[in-house]
Image: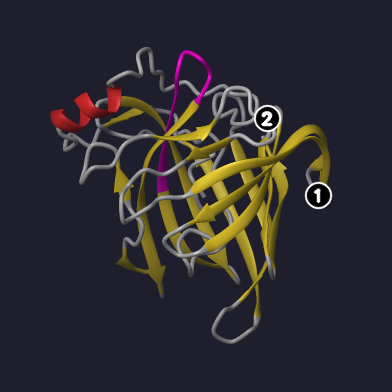
Amino acid sequence: MIPPAAIRNARRPLVGGLALLALVAAACGGDGDDGAAGSATATAGTPRISARVDHPLVPLASVHRTVLEGTERDPDTGERLRIRVDARVRAKPDRVGGIPVTVVEVRDFEDGEVVERTLDYYAQRANGDVLYVGERIDDIEGGKVVGHQGQWLTGRKGARPGIFMLARPKVGDAFQQERAPGVAEDRSTVVAVGLRVRTPAGRFKGCIKTKDYGPLDKVTEFKHYCPGVGLVREEEPGSRADLVRYR
């Protein structure tokens, strides 16, 4: 959103997380297993949280789907891999830790093969801040799920909602997107605003650039978000993905 992130942890392809941003006509049923204790923790001091996310830079309520494509270098072989991140917002909201959320389903591909599937959970405060409430992760090899590295949900094992995007971000603003101790602790800093960005999907203005750092895996990446579209570029040394289409 989207989604916090379509590199998630050290080996994942670009744009995971947060992946994000899109809408698919598929229902998402409630989990039914998020405890009441998590609900109390998540909602304390954050009244009027809504599943509707219409932040100009995270427009999950209006952008139905995004696809980013690019290349990255395999850390083991040095080979260049084609990557694609397909993000869709599910039509039905859900609840995580008692918080109403929008659900973004993200599929990450390397050379045409899906390597990760995530469900990212977002919500929005009345003041406009976008919250990142957690993510379910399936790591996939050869078509089979082999792990869930980096998975976290608000209300479980001390995890709390992070700030995915401030209502009115300005240069120097810093915020913690993921607040799952020892599992996911990514942080974001706004490094530029008022940018123009061109990708295969079009030309955009009024964009911001963030520097995102994962203290657990020591990964730094840069992202560009543009009004009315959302994430349009994600890059780190040797890797880059750009928005190629959205609706």
Is 224 drawn above or below residue 123 in the view shown?
A: below
Q: Secondary structure at mark 1?
A: loop
Residue 163, numbered label? none
Highlighted range, magenta: 119-129
Q: CA distance from mark 1 to mark 2?
A: 27 Å
Residue situated in front as seen by the camera: 235 or 41: 41
Identify the residue shown where x is 56% and y is 44%: 188
Residue 10 sits inside the magenta stretch: no
Dot 2, crowdedness within 10 Å: few (<14), some or many (≥20)?
some
Residue 170, numbered label? 2
Is 83 drawn above or below residue 56 in the view shown?
A: below
Is 92 drawn above or below residue 118 in the view shown?
A: above
Q: Secondary structure at mark 2?
A: loop
Is residue 6 in view? no
Q: Quadrant of the C terminus?
A: top right
Is 98 drawn above or below residue 116 in the view shown?
A: above
Q: Position of residue 237 (x, y in %)?
A: 68, 67
Residue 200, numbered label? 1
- Tag 2: residue type? Lys
Q: Position of residue 16 (x, y in %)?
A: 52, 53
Identify the residue shown where x is 32% and y is 18%: 45
